[in-house]
Amino acid sequence: MWVMHAGTDTVRAPSRDTMLRAIQAATSHGQGEIWLEHPDGPALGIVLGQTRAMVLRLEEAGDAGYHAVDLTAAPIPSDTYTLSNGQVDEYDDRDTVNAHHVLSIVDHFLATGERWTGVVWHNDGEDP
């Protein structure tokens, strides 16, 4: 049973379509923070900016996890990201991916629980 945290709302046992629609809406608005969690462990977090997204994949609570990266992007921020608590963050473009990848990342994660191979993932548990 999935749990979706979208902004300040929590939805228990959302359908796959509900989760994908929430992702599409956040991507269209160019902002939002969404976490998809499964009780068996894996979680996917997405923080959207206007054109880019910070995407985190955790195996379980407390895991350093992975984040999707764009090795061709600049090591400077070009976007801002508003978290559900109102905090505004900046991430280097290299540590984010183009927002058009988000739906594919989420669709693959919901189907398999794994990282989508269409983007590069950095293991945050290892040294940079």
Image (cartoon, grey):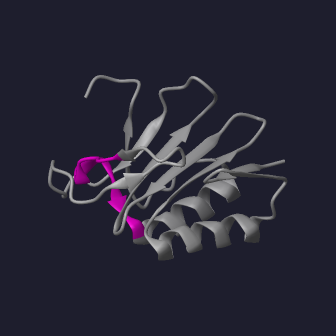
Q: Nearer the viewer, residue 6 or 115?
A: 6
Side of 34 relative to 95 (left or right)? right
Side of 39 relative to 111 (left or right)? right
Residue 115 is situated, as x and y percent measured from the top left of the image, at 52, 49
Q: Residue at x 34, y 69 (%)?
A: 51
As displayed, is residue 59 above or below residue 107?
above
| Residue at the far front in the pictured view | 86
Q: Residue at x 47, y 47 (%)?
A: 86
Total numbered labels placed on residues in the image: 0
Residue 46 included in the magenta stretch of the image = no
Q: Residue at x 58, y 73 (%)?
A: 25
Residue 39 is situated, as x and y percent measured from the top left of the image, at 78, 36
Residue 59 is situated, as x and y percent measured from the top left of the image, at 60, 33
Residue 98 included in the magenta stretch of the image = yes
As displayed, is residue 87 above or below residue 13?
above
Q: Nearer the viewer, residue 128 or 83?
A: 83
Image: magenta residue range: 89-99
| Residue at the far bottom in the pictured view | 28
Q: Quadrant of the C terminus?
A: top left
Side of 122 relative to 64 (left or right)? left
Q: Nearer the viewer, residue 35 or 112?
A: 35
